[in-house]
Amino acid sequence: MSASSPPPNPLAQLAAGRLGRSERDAAAEKARRNPYAHRLFLVIDSVPEMQRALAMTLASFGADKVEYASRASDALAKLSKYDFDVVLCDYDLGNGYDGLYLFEEVKERNLIKQSCVFMIVTGERRAPRVISAAELVPDDYLLKPFTGEVLRLRLERAMRRREAFKVVDDAVQRHDYLGAIDICNRMLAERNEFMIDFMKLKGSLALKIEDFHTAGQLYQEVLKIKEVGWAKLGLAKSLTGLKSYDEARQLFEEVLVENGRVMEAYDWLARLHQNNHQLEEAQAVLKTATGLSPVVIRRQQALAAVALRNGDLDVAEAACQTTLELAKYTWHRHPTLYADLAHVQLSRGEPSQASRTLSNLRRDFRYNEVGEWMADVVDSQIQTKTGQPQKAQQLLAAAKERYQKLAGELPAEAQMEFARACYAQKDLEAGDAVMRELVRNHHDDEALLSRIGALFEESSRGEAGRELISASVQTVIDLNNAAVKEAQAGRLDEALERFAKAHEEMPANVQVTLNLVNATLALVQRQGWHESHMRRAHELMLKVRKDAPANAKFQKLQQAWRLAIDKLGMPQWTL
């Protein structure tokens, strides 16, 4: 089957009315008799012979729509393009990349529907223990070699279970997590055989939108029914969100005593140690975790960051190197990863190694505007360290010119690296301007504010940094409060104008963006439809859905938007 065009789906054709009556009856009967005939399969395996063997086995069941992928990158591309019903994924995908990590990435990027079956196929004898410890447990695993009958029985059991989740597919795919939670509540009221499954889904959705009270209550209910690791882990996350740190830490440690392969428990435990300024303990936890599961990029990044703060440059450099190698063929690949490594190498007094990393950055991101900009930022720091101030100034000046144009495309890490380069050349004004905008656009992101504070400390400007952060956060609060007061007083035009001005000044601030949308809805509901205001609000809602779909305020506003659009009779503006 061609990868460029998805196979015809008889059920879709039936719904579209493109089949004659006899064909429709035949298609419906085929779907009823054969659960494989109307499903789209993806086989992910690097061995062609295994692909062919699985294809023949699936064909013998009646499956006639099968796609293939040999590498994780190919699989991600196809999962982004097609709406798969079943994924059969080999555990070992090469280059240290395993099927569990692919599954985690697929879930994180919302690339498969809730009703999709994801099954791991492996020759790894310890797979049952490893897979049972995963945060997002796949539907099943198969140990090689296996018979066609074993595959059929496992698939049909998993498909039957996953079929129950079709009711939430649309809501989750639209990032309507509140709507999906409402559906879970309705399903839980039925108290059917999938009750625990829907409790697990509801808990994960509640955590996703940071409704920690709802999530905590649900996990406590599950634990009253049955002591299961995923519920204990979920409760610990909920307690962390509720700032009950001691209870959370105790629970994470209990989870790890019961099963030392629950990798996410290590990540959260390390985070708790960092929040408590216990950096050595955080590093020890992350070192253990990366030893057990070395292929998770964000964990290696976390280890590098905490080791750097501890002054353990050997560990920091090794973790940065590993991060780069892992990210090379994935969507995580970014110029900032090279900058992180070069920064550690410069901290170790190894400018020649940093220059080699810079060469790799220039080669790998040639003709990429952000990559070339990042290379100049890194190069300016190398030139500063090697006693070439004039060259360093020229490079930084060139980076400054392009910064304003690129700022909207740059992640926080890239902007912080630019600020670090400015501070290295004693250009405090330029560095502070970058940091101030970062704080204003992310004033409620505690983790980022902590990293910004650490950069100020590293630059021997701790006190100045604390003052800048505090003043910048207060500026956002004051702007927001002034607009809210206008709205509360019924002066909606003035409120809208204030929020619009605040958004213009802080385009990446999600809270300000959503307040502007909320004010727009209030205005049109009182004064009637306003085309340009609603067009802007619609664009902003789409942007937030892309960048921060789990934001709790966005979730509530999404429902309010839908109600307003229905009331105003403007279905073309539906999200």
Image (cartoon, rainbow, N blue to C red):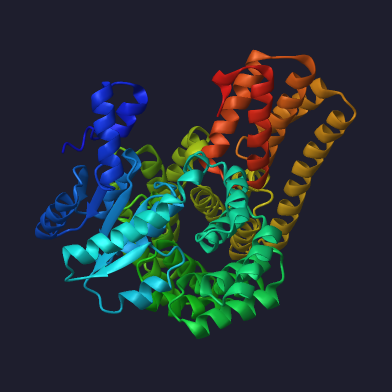
Placement of 30 over or under 227, stated as above or below: above
Q: Quadrant of the N terminus?
A: top left
Q: Nearer the viewer, residue 158 or 391?
A: 158
- State the image coordinates of residue 58 (x, y, percent, origin top left): 18, 53
Q: Which corner quadrant of the image does residue 382 belong to?
A: bottom left
Q: Nearer the viewer, residue 240 or 493?
A: 240
Residue 504 seen in the figure: no
- Report the residue at 20% width, 48% height from top: 68
- State the image coordinates of residue 247 (x, y, percent, origin top left): 68, 77
- Report the residue at 29% width, 63% height from top: 154
Q: Which corner quadrant of the image does residue 124 belong to?
A: bottom left
Residue 136 seen in the figure: yes
Q: Quadrant of the C terminus?
A: top right
Q: Is residue 55 left or right of residue 365?
A: left
Q: How many marks?
A: 0
Residue at the limit of the structure toward the bottom, as seen here = 257
Q: Which corner quadrant of the image does residue 523 belong to?
A: top right
Q: Nearer the viewer, residue 502 or 181?
A: 181
- State the image coordinates of residue 459 (x, y, percent, origin top left): 59, 61
Q: Is residue 501 left or right of residue 484?
A: left
Residue at the limit of the structure toward the right, as seen here = 489
Q: Is residue 58 left or right of residue 294?
A: left
Placement of 17 over or under 6, stated as above or below: above
- Report the residue at 37% width, 75% height from top: 130
